[in-house]
Image (spheres, rainbow, N blue to C red):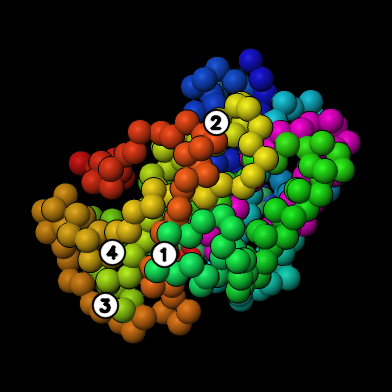
Protein backbone atom coordinates (compact mmCIF):
# COMPACT_ATOMS: atom_id res chain seq x y z
CA UNK A 1 0.00 0.00 0.00
CA UNK A 2 1.14 3.50 -0.75
CA UNK A 3 1.54 6.53 1.50
CA UNK A 4 -0.22 9.73 0.45
CA UNK A 5 0.17 13.31 1.60
CA UNK A 6 -3.08 15.30 1.78
CA UNK A 7 -2.49 19.01 2.30
CA UNK A 8 -5.58 20.65 3.76
CA UNK A 9 -6.60 17.17 4.91
CA UNK A 10 -8.37 18.43 8.04
CA UNK A 11 -10.83 20.45 5.94
CA UNK A 12 -14.11 19.62 4.22
CA UNK A 13 -12.94 17.91 1.02
CA UNK A 14 -9.56 16.83 2.41
CA UNK A 15 -10.95 14.91 5.37
CA UNK A 16 -13.42 13.08 3.12
CA UNK A 17 -10.47 12.08 0.91
CA UNK A 18 -8.46 10.97 3.94
CA UNK A 19 -11.32 8.66 4.96
CA UNK A 20 -11.41 7.12 1.49
CA UNK A 21 -7.64 6.58 1.36
CA UNK A 22 -7.61 4.95 4.80
CA UNK A 23 -10.60 2.79 3.88
CA UNK A 24 -8.66 1.59 0.82
CA UNK A 25 -5.84 0.48 3.14
CA UNK A 26 -3.33 3.24 2.43
CA UNK A 27 -1.13 5.23 4.78
CA UNK A 28 -1.94 8.94 4.94
CA UNK A 29 -0.12 12.03 6.10
CA UNK A 30 -2.10 15.22 6.58
CA UNK A 31 -0.48 18.65 6.50
CA UNK A 32 -2.90 21.32 7.71
CA UNK A 33 -2.51 24.53 9.71
CA UNK A 34 -6.02 24.17 11.18
CA UNK A 35 -6.96 27.67 10.03
CA UNK A 36 -10.25 26.20 8.81
CA UNK A 37 -9.79 22.47 9.27
CA UNK A 38 -10.49 20.63 12.49
CA UNK A 39 -8.78 17.76 14.26
CA UNK A 40 -12.25 16.33 14.86
CA UNK A 41 -12.61 15.82 11.08
CA UNK A 42 -9.80 13.23 11.26
CA UNK A 43 -9.68 9.71 12.71
CA UNK A 44 -6.56 10.53 14.70
CA UNK A 45 -6.57 7.15 16.47
CA UNK A 46 -5.97 5.35 13.17
CA UNK A 47 -2.32 4.17 13.22
CA UNK A 48 -2.09 4.61 9.43
CA UNK A 49 -2.76 8.35 9.75
CA UNK A 50 -0.09 10.90 10.64
CA UNK A 51 -1.17 14.46 11.31
CA UNK A 52 1.36 17.27 10.79
CA UNK A 53 0.18 20.64 12.04
CA UNK A 54 1.96 23.11 9.78
CA UNK A 55 1.72 25.68 7.03
CA UNK A 56 2.18 25.00 3.31
CA UNK A 57 3.74 28.47 3.08
CA UNK A 58 6.65 27.11 5.16
CA UNK A 59 9.02 25.55 2.59
CA UNK A 60 10.90 23.47 5.17
CA UNK A 61 7.73 21.96 6.61
CA UNK A 62 6.52 21.05 3.10
CA UNK A 63 9.92 19.54 2.23
CA UNK A 64 9.71 17.22 5.25
CA UNK A 65 6.08 16.34 4.70
CA UNK A 66 6.69 15.30 1.08
CA UNK A 67 9.78 13.15 1.76
CA UNK A 68 9.04 9.51 1.08
CA UNK A 69 5.40 9.82 0.05
CA UNK A 70 4.04 8.24 -3.14
CA UNK A 71 1.71 11.04 -4.29
CA UNK A 72 0.11 14.23 -3.03
CA UNK A 73 -3.40 15.66 -2.97
CA UNK A 74 -2.95 19.42 -2.67
CA UNK A 75 -6.13 20.82 -1.17
CA UNK A 76 -4.71 23.31 1.33
CA UNK A 77 -5.87 26.82 0.51
CA UNK A 78 -7.89 29.65 1.92
CA UNK A 79 -11.06 28.50 0.18
CA UNK A 80 -13.01 31.72 0.66
CA UNK A 81 -12.94 34.02 -2.35
CA UNK A 82 -13.97 36.92 -0.13
CA UNK A 83 -11.03 36.33 2.23
CA UNK A 84 -8.70 36.71 -0.76
CA UNK A 85 -10.38 39.98 -1.68
CA UNK A 86 -10.04 41.26 1.89
CA UNK A 87 -6.42 40.17 2.35
CA UNK A 88 -4.66 39.29 -0.92
CA UNK A 89 -1.19 39.21 0.63
CA UNK A 90 -1.98 36.71 3.39
CA UNK A 91 -4.08 34.42 1.18
CA UNK A 92 -1.40 34.43 -1.52
CA UNK A 93 0.97 32.75 0.95
CA UNK A 94 -1.36 29.78 1.32
CA UNK A 95 -2.90 29.72 -2.13
CA UNK A 96 0.11 30.32 -4.32
CA UNK A 97 3.37 30.08 -2.33
CA UNK A 98 2.06 26.87 -0.78
CA UNK A 99 1.67 25.36 -4.26
CA UNK A 100 5.11 26.50 -5.35
CA UNK A 101 6.69 25.07 -2.19
CA UNK A 102 4.99 21.80 -2.95
CA UNK A 103 6.27 21.74 -6.53
CA UNK A 104 9.83 22.26 -5.30
CA UNK A 105 9.56 19.64 -2.58
CA UNK A 106 8.16 17.10 -5.05
CA UNK A 107 10.93 17.82 -7.53
CA UNK A 108 13.59 17.39 -4.84
CA UNK A 109 12.12 14.16 -3.51
CA UNK A 110 11.19 12.69 -6.90
CA UNK A 111 7.48 12.53 -6.11
CA UNK A 112 5.57 12.95 -9.34
CA UNK A 113 1.82 12.70 -9.01
CA UNK A 114 -0.16 15.56 -7.50
CA UNK A 115 -3.90 16.17 -7.50
CA UNK A 116 -4.58 19.91 -7.59
CA UNK A 117 -7.81 21.54 -6.40
CA UNK A 118 -8.46 24.28 -8.92
CA UNK A 119 -11.73 26.16 -9.27
CA UNK A 120 -14.42 27.33 -11.67
CA UNK A 121 -13.47 30.78 -10.36
CA UNK A 122 -10.66 30.90 -12.98
CA UNK A 123 -13.30 31.44 -15.71
CA UNK A 124 -14.73 34.52 -13.98
CA UNK A 125 -17.94 35.51 -15.75
CA UNK A 126 -16.94 33.91 -19.03
CA UNK A 127 -19.23 31.19 -20.28
CA UNK A 128 -22.02 32.39 -18.02
CA UNK A 129 -25.35 30.93 -19.13
CA UNK A 130 -23.79 28.17 -21.26
CA UNK A 131 -21.98 25.01 -20.27
CA UNK A 132 -18.43 26.15 -19.49
CA UNK A 133 -15.76 23.98 -21.09
CA UNK A 134 -12.06 23.96 -20.24
CA UNK A 135 -11.11 26.04 -23.30
CA UNK A 136 -13.29 28.93 -22.11
CA UNK A 137 -11.19 32.07 -21.81
CA UNK A 138 -9.81 32.51 -18.30
CA UNK A 139 -10.84 35.59 -16.37
CA UNK A 140 -9.51 35.36 -12.82
CA UNK A 141 -11.34 38.29 -11.24
CA UNK A 142 -10.12 37.85 -7.66
CA UNK A 143 -6.82 37.06 -5.92
CA UNK A 144 -8.27 33.62 -5.15
CA UNK A 145 -8.85 32.91 -8.84
CA UNK A 146 -5.52 34.43 -9.90
CA UNK A 147 -3.63 32.24 -7.41
CA UNK A 148 -5.47 29.09 -8.50
CA UNK A 149 -4.74 29.80 -12.18
CA UNK A 150 -1.11 30.70 -11.45
CA UNK A 151 -0.83 27.41 -9.56
CA UNK A 152 -2.03 25.57 -12.67
CA UNK A 153 0.62 27.31 -14.78
CA UNK A 154 3.41 26.52 -12.31
CA UNK A 155 2.35 22.91 -12.08
CA UNK A 156 2.46 22.76 -15.86
CA UNK A 157 5.97 24.20 -15.83
CA UNK A 158 7.09 21.54 -13.34
CA UNK A 159 5.40 18.91 -15.54
CA UNK A 160 7.36 19.99 -18.60
CA UNK A 161 10.63 20.67 -16.83
CA UNK A 162 10.69 18.12 -14.01
CA UNK A 163 8.22 15.39 -15.05
CA UNK A 164 5.68 16.14 -12.35
CA UNK A 165 2.25 14.64 -13.05
CA UNK A 166 -0.31 17.25 -11.99
CA UNK A 167 -3.90 15.99 -12.23
CA UNK A 168 -5.81 19.27 -12.25
CA UNK A 169 -9.49 19.33 -11.26
CA UNK A 170 -11.52 22.53 -11.59
CA UNK A 171 -14.24 22.15 -9.00
CA UNK A 172 -17.63 23.79 -9.49
CA UNK A 173 -19.91 23.86 -6.40
CA UNK A 174 -19.02 21.00 -4.07
CA UNK A 175 -21.28 20.18 -1.13
CA UNK A 176 -21.65 17.58 1.58
CA UNK A 177 -20.79 16.60 5.14
CA UNK A 178 -18.12 18.66 6.96
CA UNK A 179 -18.48 21.75 4.79
CA UNK A 180 -18.21 24.54 7.34
CA UNK A 181 -21.28 26.84 7.30
CA UNK A 182 -19.82 29.40 9.69
CA UNK A 183 -18.98 32.22 7.25
CA UNK A 184 -21.49 34.11 5.09
CA UNK A 185 -19.26 33.08 2.16
CA UNK A 186 -19.47 29.38 2.99
CA UNK A 187 -21.11 27.11 0.43
CA UNK A 188 -24.79 27.95 0.09
CA UNK A 189 -25.92 24.38 0.79
CA UNK A 190 -24.03 24.23 4.07
CA UNK A 191 -25.65 27.51 5.16
CA UNK A 192 -29.19 26.69 4.04
CA UNK A 193 -29.23 23.19 5.54
CA UNK A 194 -27.83 24.30 8.87
CA UNK A 195 -30.29 27.16 9.15
CA UNK A 196 -33.22 24.99 8.08
CA UNK A 197 -32.35 22.46 10.76
CA UNK A 198 -32.00 25.14 13.42
CA UNK A 199 -35.16 26.97 12.33
CA UNK A 200 -33.20 30.16 11.62
CA UNK A 201 -34.21 32.56 8.83
CA UNK A 202 -32.63 32.02 5.42
CA UNK A 203 -31.35 34.87 3.22
CA UNK A 204 -31.48 34.48 -0.54
CA UNK A 205 -29.39 37.01 -2.42
CA UNK A 206 -31.50 38.01 -5.41
CA UNK A 207 -34.57 36.24 -6.74
CA UNK A 208 -33.27 32.72 -6.14
CA UNK A 209 -33.40 31.89 -9.85
CA UNK A 210 -29.61 31.87 -10.14
CA UNK A 211 -28.31 28.37 -10.84
CA UNK A 212 -25.33 26.29 -9.81
CA UNK A 213 -23.93 22.89 -10.76
CA UNK A 214 -23.82 21.12 -7.38
CA UNK A 215 -21.50 18.13 -6.99
CA UNK A 216 -21.61 15.83 -3.95
CA UNK A 217 -18.32 15.45 -2.13
CA UNK A 218 -18.50 11.64 -2.11
CA UNK A 219 -18.64 11.66 -5.93
CA UNK A 220 -15.73 14.09 -6.08
CA UNK A 221 -13.64 11.81 -3.84
CA UNK A 222 -14.05 8.96 -6.37
CA UNK A 223 -12.52 11.23 -8.99
CA UNK A 224 -9.70 12.43 -6.73
CA UNK A 225 -8.81 8.81 -5.92
CA UNK A 226 -8.45 8.16 -9.66
CA UNK A 227 -6.37 11.32 -9.92
CA UNK A 228 -4.01 9.93 -7.29
CA UNK A 229 -3.91 6.28 -8.33
CA UNK A 230 -4.99 6.08 -11.97
CA UNK A 231 -3.33 6.76 -15.27
CA UNK A 232 -2.04 10.32 -15.55
CA UNK A 233 -4.40 12.75 -17.29
CA UNK A 234 -2.43 15.72 -18.55
CA UNK A 235 -5.31 18.10 -19.28
CA UNK A 236 -7.22 19.96 -16.57
CA UNK A 237 -10.82 18.82 -16.17
CA UNK A 238 -13.98 20.54 -14.97
CA UNK A 239 -15.82 18.80 -12.16
CA UNK A 240 -19.57 19.30 -12.48
CA UNK A 241 -22.60 17.44 -13.80
CA UNK A 242 -23.62 19.94 -16.50
CA UNK A 243 -26.82 20.41 -14.52
CA UNK A 244 -28.31 23.70 -13.40
CA UNK A 245 -30.16 23.81 -10.08
CA UNK A 246 -31.68 27.10 -8.95
CA UNK A 247 -31.58 28.22 -5.33
CA UNK A 248 -35.38 28.11 -5.32
CA UNK A 249 -35.29 24.45 -6.40
CA UNK A 250 -32.65 23.79 -3.75
CA UNK A 251 -34.82 25.36 -1.05
CA UNK A 252 -37.82 23.29 -2.15
CA UNK A 253 -35.73 20.11 -1.75
CA UNK A 254 -34.46 21.15 1.67
CA UNK A 255 -38.00 22.08 2.75
CA UNK A 256 -39.30 18.67 1.66
CA UNK A 257 -36.63 16.88 3.70
CA UNK A 258 -36.94 19.08 6.79
CA UNK A 259 -40.73 19.17 6.92
CA UNK A 260 -40.87 22.83 5.95
CA UNK A 261 -38.60 25.85 5.83
CA UNK A 262 -37.96 28.70 8.21
CA UNK A 263 -38.60 32.25 7.02
CA UNK A 264 -36.94 32.94 3.63
CA UNK A 265 -35.96 36.56 3.00
CA UNK A 266 -34.80 37.94 -0.34
CA UNK A 267 -31.94 40.45 -0.17
CA UNK A 268 -30.25 42.28 -3.05
CA UNK A 269 -28.07 40.08 -5.23
CA UNK A 270 -24.40 39.97 -4.24
CA UNK A 271 -22.19 42.30 -6.24
CA UNK A 272 -20.42 40.29 -8.93
CA UNK A 273 -22.52 37.20 -8.30
CA UNK A 274 -22.55 34.86 -11.28
CA UNK A 275 -26.09 34.22 -12.49
CA UNK A 276 -25.65 30.78 -14.03
CA UNK A 277 -22.69 28.46 -13.56
CA UNK A 278 -22.68 25.03 -15.20
CA UNK A 279 -19.81 22.78 -16.22
CA UNK A 280 -19.31 21.14 -19.58
CA UNK A 281 -17.93 17.83 -18.33
CA UNK A 282 -17.21 16.09 -21.64
CA UNK A 283 -13.47 16.05 -20.93
CA UNK A 284 -14.01 14.64 -17.45
CA UNK A 285 -16.16 11.89 -18.93
CA UNK A 286 -13.57 11.14 -21.60
CA UNK A 287 -10.67 10.72 -19.19
CA UNK A 288 -12.11 9.55 -15.88
CA UNK A 289 -14.50 6.82 -14.82
CA UNK A 290 -17.56 8.85 -13.82
CA UNK A 291 -18.98 8.14 -10.41
CA UNK A 292 -22.63 7.23 -10.24
CA UNK A 293 -24.21 10.58 -9.50
CA UNK A 294 -25.46 11.07 -5.97
CA UNK A 295 -28.71 12.93 -6.69
CA UNK A 296 -29.08 16.30 -4.99
CA UNK A 297 -31.84 14.97 -2.74
CA UNK A 298 -29.73 12.01 -1.62
CA UNK A 299 -26.73 14.26 -0.97
CA UNK A 300 -28.92 16.59 1.07
CA UNK A 301 -30.26 13.60 2.99
CA UNK A 302 -26.71 12.54 3.90
CA UNK A 303 -25.91 16.06 4.96
CA UNK A 304 -29.06 16.50 7.02
CA UNK A 305 -28.85 13.00 8.47
CA UNK A 306 -32.49 12.27 7.55
P1 LIG B 1 -11.66 23.92 3.60
O1 LIG B 1 -11.42 25.29 4.11
O2 LIG B 1 -12.58 23.04 4.39
O3 LIG B 1 -10.27 23.15 3.41
C1 LIG B 1 -9.03 23.79 3.22
C2 LIG B 1 -8.07 23.26 4.27
O4 LIG B 1 -6.79 23.87 4.05
C3 LIG B 1 -8.49 23.64 5.71
O5 LIG B 1 -8.43 22.48 6.51
C4 LIG B 1 -7.45 24.67 6.13
O6 LIG B 1 -7.22 24.62 7.52
C5 LIG B 1 -6.26 24.26 5.30
N1 LIG B 1 -5.31 25.36 5.04
C6 LIG B 1 -5.59 26.62 4.62
N2 LIG B 1 -4.44 27.34 4.50
C7 LIG B 1 -3.43 26.49 4.85
C8 LIG B 1 -2.03 26.65 4.92
N3 LIG B 1 -1.44 27.81 4.64
N4 LIG B 1 -1.28 25.60 5.32
C9 LIG B 1 -1.87 24.40 5.63
N5 LIG B 1 -3.20 24.20 5.58
C10 LIG B 1 -3.97 25.24 5.19
O7 LIG B 1 -12.19 24.05 2.10
P2 LIG B 1 -12.59 22.93 1.03
O8 LIG B 1 -13.90 23.34 0.48
O9 LIG B 1 -12.39 21.56 1.58
O10 LIG B 1 -11.51 23.22 -0.11
C11 LIG B 1 -10.45 22.33 -0.44
C12 LIG B 1 -9.79 22.83 -1.70
O11 LIG B 1 -10.72 22.82 -2.78
C13 LIG B 1 -9.27 24.26 -1.61
O12 LIG B 1 -8.04 24.34 -2.30
C14 LIG B 1 -10.34 25.07 -2.31
O13 LIG B 1 -9.82 26.27 -2.84
C15 LIG B 1 -10.75 24.10 -3.40
N6 LIG B 1 -12.09 24.36 -3.95
C16 LIG B 1 -13.21 24.12 -3.21
C17 LIG B 1 -14.47 24.35 -3.76
C18 LIG B 1 -15.75 24.02 -3.02
O14 LIG B 1 -16.83 24.09 -3.64
N7 LIG B 1 -15.70 23.66 -1.76
C19 LIG B 1 -14.59 24.87 -5.07
C20 LIG B 1 -13.42 25.12 -5.78
C21 LIG B 1 -12.17 24.85 -5.22
C1 LIG C 1 -18.40 29.26 -5.76
C2 LIG C 1 -17.26 28.96 -4.81
C3 LIG C 1 -16.14 29.95 -5.00
C4 LIG C 1 -15.74 30.08 -6.45
C5 LIG C 1 -16.96 30.37 -7.32
C6 LIG C 1 -16.58 30.32 -8.79
C7 LIG C 1 -18.06 27.95 -2.74
C8 LIG C 1 -18.40 28.16 -1.32
N1 LIG C 1 -17.68 29.05 -3.43
O1 LIG C 1 -19.01 30.50 -5.41
O2 LIG C 1 -15.03 29.50 -4.25
O3 LIG C 1 -15.11 28.88 -6.87
O4 LIG C 1 -17.97 29.36 -7.10
O5 LIG C 1 -17.62 30.70 -9.59
O6 LIG C 1 -18.07 26.87 -3.26
N2 LIG C 1 -26.29 32.60 -1.56
C9 LIG C 1 -27.47 32.99 -0.99
N3 LIG C 1 -27.57 32.98 0.38
C10 LIG C 1 -26.52 32.61 1.18
C11 LIG C 1 -25.32 32.20 0.58
C12 LIG C 1 -25.23 32.21 -0.81
O7 LIG C 1 -28.44 33.34 -1.67
O8 LIG C 1 -26.69 32.63 2.42
C13 LIG C 1 -26.20 32.57 -3.04
C14 LIG C 1 -25.04 33.33 -3.61
O9 LIG C 1 -25.35 34.70 -3.76
C15 LIG C 1 -24.87 32.61 -4.95
C16 LIG C 1 -25.27 31.16 -4.64
O10 LIG C 1 -26.01 31.22 -3.42
O11 LIG C 1 -25.76 33.13 -5.90
C17 LIG C 1 -24.08 30.23 -4.45
O12 LIG C 1 -23.19 30.84 -3.51
P1 LIG C 1 -21.88 30.09 -2.95
O13 LIG C 1 -21.20 31.07 -2.07
O14 LIG C 1 -22.25 28.76 -2.38
O15 LIG C 1 -21.01 29.75 -4.23
P2 LIG C 1 -20.56 30.62 -5.49
O16 LIG C 1 -21.10 29.89 -6.69
O17 LIG C 1 -20.91 32.04 -5.33
Residue drawn at (71%, 46%) of the image: 54
Was residue 102 drawn as part of the magenta stretch in this picture? yes
Whole-angstrom CA distance, mark 4 to mark 2, is 29 Å
Q: Measured from the top left, where is residue 160 in percent x and y? A: 82, 43
- The residue that mark 4 highlights is 246
Badge nearest the viewer, 1 or 3 = 1
Dot 3: few (<14), some (14–19), or many (≥20) neighbours within 10 Å? some
Whole-angstrom CA distance, mark 1 to mark 3, is 20 Å
Q: Which residues are magenta?
A: 94-121
Whether residue 110 is visible, yes or no, is yes
Q: Which of the 4 quarters of the picture holds residue 57?
A: bottom right
Badge nearest the viewer, 1 or 4 = 1
Whole-angstrom CA distance, mark 1 to mark 4, is 15 Å
* Circle number at residue 220: none
Q: Classify residue 304 as left or right of residue 75.
A: left
Secondary structure beneath label 2: helix
Asked if the residue at tag 3 contacts the one at tag 4, i.e. Cβ–Cβ closer than 8 Å, the answer is: no
* Circle number at residue 225: 2
- The residue that mark 1 highlights is 130
Secondary structure beneath label 3: loop
Whole-angstrom CA distance, mark 4 to mark 3, is 10 Å
Q: Classify residue 68 as left or right of residue 72.
A: right
Whether residue 174 is visible, yes or no, is no
* Circle number at residue 207: 3
Asked if the residue at tag 3 contacts the one at tag 1, i.e. Cβ–Cβ closer than 8 Å, the answer is: no
Residue drawn at (76%, 33%) of the image: 112
Badge 2 residue CB within 8 Å of ligand 1: no
Amino acid sequence: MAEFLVTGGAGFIGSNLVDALLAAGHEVRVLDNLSMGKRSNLPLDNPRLRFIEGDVADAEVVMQAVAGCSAVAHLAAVASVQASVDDPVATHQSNFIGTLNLCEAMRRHGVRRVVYASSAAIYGNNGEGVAIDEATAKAPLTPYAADKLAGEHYLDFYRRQHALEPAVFRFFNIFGPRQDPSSPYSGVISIFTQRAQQGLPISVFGDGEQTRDFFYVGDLIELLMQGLLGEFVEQPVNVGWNQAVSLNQLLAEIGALCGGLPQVTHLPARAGDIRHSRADNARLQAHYRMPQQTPLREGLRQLLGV
